[in-house]
Image (cartoon, rainbow, N blue to C red):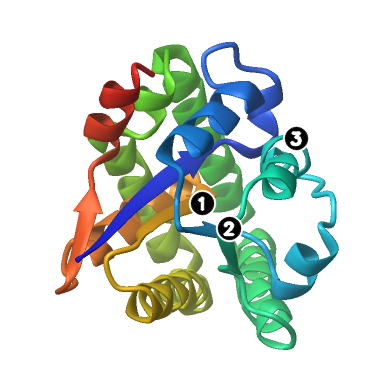
Amino acid sequence: MTDILVLSTLHQLHGELPYYTYEHLSQIIENFSPDILAVELTPADLAARKPQQIKREYQHSVYPLLETNQWSVIPLEPGEPTYSELVQKGKKAMETLAKEHPEAMEGFGLYVNALYQVLLGWWKSPLDVNSAETDRHFEVKHTYQNALFGKDEEEGWELWNQHFLEQILAAATSCAECRILVLVGAEHGYWLRGALRKQEGIHMLEPASVLRDMGI
């Protein structure tokens, strides 16, 4: 049976938060010592080790580890033209809402800001970021977001996460009884964990147990 851990990351916020730094992230990855590391990058960006503007954990944590470890690495994001097609779905939905219902767009912005203020005030460790409570908050956010922005947003979000899931399952099929570590932005965590719990032949590791065993 394949062991899979989905680890939520905070992108550029790792450089600002003392309880979940780039060093903490590197330590968790090394301690887990995966057979396969699944990363939130396109195939081209992974191959080029391209520095990321938002997902800065890659140049600060992941790329250096890849230089000193022999893990297999797979990209989760699609290549072109699928990448741009999915990005455009979300962009189109946002532009339509802003044009037709600017007050709703403003209200959504206030909600998102308030949500992150609450989470940033509550989080005190990587375990908190990867907790079931955090997953519930983001599930509610995206349920609301999909309802507010409409069909394009919902389809784009589902297709994006489904592509991630397909890459993970393909890796699990190719390497029975491997340990797979999946790195994704925190808002994707609830979706992937929920989907992986339903898969046969996979042991979805709960972050709380893994991080506690590491003393994180």
Instruction: Look at the numbered discs 2 and 3 and tell me whether their residues touch, using CB distance below 8 Å.
Output: no
Which residue is pictured at 68% across the width and 68% down the height? Answer: 91
User: Which residue is label 2 attached to?
Assistant: 39
Position of 106 with respect to 150 (left or right) is right
Q: Position of residue 73 (x, y in %)?
A: 59, 63
**Label 1, label 3: how far apart the Cα atoms are:** 15 Å
Residue 166 appears in the rendering: yes
Nearer the camera: disc 1 or disc 3:
3
Sooner in the amino-acid sequence: mark 2 or mark 3:
2
Q: Residues within 10 Å of mark 1 (few under 14, many from 20)?
A: many
Task: State whether residue 31 is above or below residue 161.
Answer: above
Q: Which mark is residue 7?
A: none
The amino acid sitting under disc 2 is: Val
**Dot 1: element:** strand
Disc 2 crowd rating (10 Å Cα; few below 14, some 14-19, many 20+) is many
Query: In the rendered image, which residue does mark 1 sit on?
Result: 184
Q: Residue at the spot x=85%, y=64% of the render? A: 48
Sequence-wise, the earlier of marks 1 and 3 is 3
Callout 1 amino acid? Val
**Element assignment for label 3:** helix
Q: Quick one: 81 or 113, which is closer to the camera?
A: 81
Indicate which disc residue 60 carries: 3
Residue at image location 42% in from the left, 13% down from the top: 124
Question: Which quarter shows the N terminus?
Answer: bottom left
**Structural distance between the alpha carbons of marks 2 and 3:** 14 Å
